[in-house]
Amino acid sequence: MTTAKKASTKSAATRRPRGEPRRLLLDAARDLFARQDYRSTTTKEIAETAGVAEHLLFRNFGSKAALFREALVVPFASFVDDFSNTWMSVIPEETDEQQLAAQFVGRLYDLFVEHRGLVLTLWASDSMSEEDLAEAGIAEIQRALTVLSRIGAEGMDIRGMRSARSDLVARSTVAMIAGMAVFRSTFFGSTRPSRKAIVAELTQASLHGFLHRDSPG
């Protein structure tokens, strides 16, 4: 077999399936962003962790910020869109509010556990440039939170309750869930409660903290 044929055979044997480098880069980005801040994570480091050439990162995503957006921002925005669609189909008289709240809290908690780097980067976003903030899709997070604020306000209307800051109600709930997801080890060490117990407590706190507001006088 000629050298050229050997090289061709080796290349074919080691060629990755279509889309595999993209998946590996997304997984590596989520892992690294969860352990260190956005600014200190380099494209070279992401590529090395993924086991692919660095140029493939730019070919697939264009930039580190765009990779961050797809790896961490898009899942959150998609979750909010899905829940918004669920909310639009809710018939209050036929809906178990406890079950709906538990579904929301559980899914959001799991998302933050899996995408811990999103929370860490949002809390450190003051150190990002305006260009990076725009390209990384941070504005999409704000839009998603606005959607949750609207849902929260509509839920309060259904209950005959009012708040001058319905947006704060929604954002406080998200912040509580995010904090428990990201800082589980910090809060509980090696004896942290089960996911089931944490989600149940978060559901009670968010649902009943909402329901027990004073009605407008």
Image (cartoon, rainbow, N blue to C red):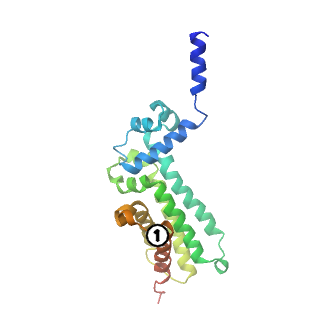
Quarter of the image with the N terminus is: top right
On the image, the x and y values in percent for residue 5 come to: 61, 14
Q: Is residue 15 above or below residue 69?
A: above
Does dot 1 land on a helix, a strand or a loop? helix
Total numbered badges shown on the rendered structure: 1
Please tell me in which quadrant of the rendered image residue 16 appears: top right
Q: Nearer the viewer, residue 177 or 140?
A: 177
Q: Is residue 134 above or below residue 101?
A: above
Residue at 67 percent across and 78 percent down: it is 94
Residue at 44 percent across and 47 percent down: it is 31
Residue sitting farthest toward the front: 191
On the image, the x and y values in percent for residue 134 come to: 43, 48
Residue at 60 percent across and 25 percent down: it is 13
Mark 1 crowdedness (10 Å alpha carbons): few <14, some 14-19, many ≥20: some
Residue at 49 percent across and 47 percent down: it is 71
What amino acid type should be assigned to the residue bearing mark 1? Answer: Ile
Residue sitting farthest toward the bottom: 217
The residue that label 1 is drawn on is 198
